[in-house]
Amino acid sequence: MRIGTKIGNTVLIPLTVKAIDLLDIPGVVAFSTMRSATDVSDPYDGFNTCSYTGDAAEHVESCRSEVAQLLGIDAGALIMPRQTHSANVKIIYRHSVSLEDTDALVTCMRQTALCIHTADCVPVVMADVEAGVIGAAHSGWRGAEKRIVAATVDAMCSLGARPDRIVASMGPSICPKCFEVGDEVAQKFERYGAVSRINHVAHVDLYRVVAATLEDAGVNSRNISLPPTCSLCDCDNYFSARAMGVSSGRTLSVIMLR
Ligand SMILES: [Zn+2]
């Protein structure tokens, strides 16, 4: 993945965008972008490619063209769905498709960047390199409840992937210590053993729910990587809706077959 100079886990890219690698597999590029904000109190300051959460169109466009340049593709090959916390998975066969109400993408097309935007929800990228099939999903608690990552694995398998060959990685997202929820939400995740109480307030471990759902779908636990960091603990570097409000920029997680 020669997309920049690597220092530890951080890839420094010779543009303004900085990113953290999610997978280290030949032939696959997968990373999450960092904010690189100069004023962290401004909810849109930094690198943001999400067009529907209130940022200025020109800023979004310039960030998109930067990430396209970084990947060596046209901006039209950045596949960016309009996410709605659904469990809808779309298989991408061509670049110009309607992506309304879509929270996961799957493809076997090369040079086609599957993009997921998050600010605390869990972005998940997946690949079966042998089959040449990749996937990306957005799993907040609603997507986790609907088991969107299992639906993504199914869609990948419809293109020839095999669950036991799939490698999956979660991007920066909210950690169990930070993810306070009401009891109604917590009870949906008791069966995963993913609920804890801190000062009588329920907390959900979304990482555990996503990993358990992937394992149920046949993905080997040793092929599942947890997020490199928490978006809220580390909100100077990653967008966090809990820190900045839902009207804020989003972290972009990308996966692409070279
Ligand atoms: Zn945290």
Image: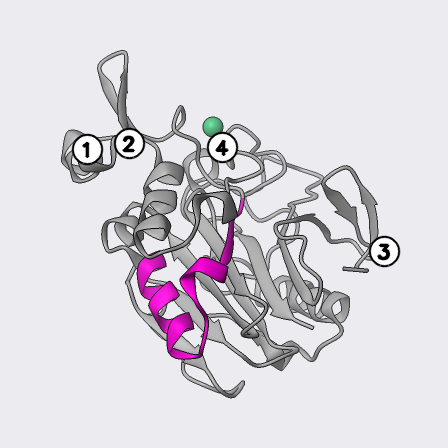
On the image, numbered disc 3 is attached to which residue? 14
Q: Secondary structure at mark 3?
A: loop
Q: Earlier in the sequence, mark 4 or mark 2?
A: 2
On the image, numbered disc 2 is attached to which residue? 194
Q: Do the CB atoms of the residues marked 1 and 3 lie less than 8 Å apart?
A: no
Count residues near mark 2 (Cα–Cα under 10 Å), then give few for <14, some for 14-19, many for 20+. some
Q: What residue sits 40% from the left and 39% below the top?
A: 207
What type is the residue that disc 4 sits on?
Answer: Leu
From the top left corner, tell me how far across and down residue 189 is, in percent. Answer: 22, 37
Count residues near mark 3 (Cα–Cα under 10 Å), then give few for <14, some for 14-19, many for 20+. few
What type is the residue that disc 1 sits on?
Answer: Glu
The reply to whether residue 219 is visible in this rendering is yes
Magenta span includes 151: yes
User: What is the magenta range?
Assistant: 149-171
Q: Do the CB atoms of the residues marked 1 and 2 lie less than 8 Å apart?
A: yes
Count residues near mark 1 (Cα–Cα under 10 Å), then give few for <14, some for 14-19, many for 20+. few
Q: What residue sits 35% from the left and 33% below the top?
A: 205
Is the C-beta of the residue carrying label 4 under 8 Å from the nearest atom of ligand 1?
A: yes
Image vertical order of residue 153 relative to residue 109, above or below:
above
From the top left corner, tell me how far across and down residue 106 is, in percent. Answer: 45, 72
What type is the residue that disc 3 sits on?
Answer: Pro
On the image, numbered disc 1 is attached to which residue? 190
Q: CA distance from mark 1 to mark 3?
A: 45 Å
Q: Do the CB atoms of the residues marked 4 and 2 lie less than 8 Å apart?
A: no
Image vertical order of residue 222 relative to residue 71, above or below:
above
From the top left corner, tell me how far across and down residue 201 is, in percent. Answer: 24, 19
Q: CA distance from mark 4 to mark 3?
A: 27 Å
Q: Closest to the observer: 194 or 11?
A: 194
Left or right: residue 188 versus residue 131 is left
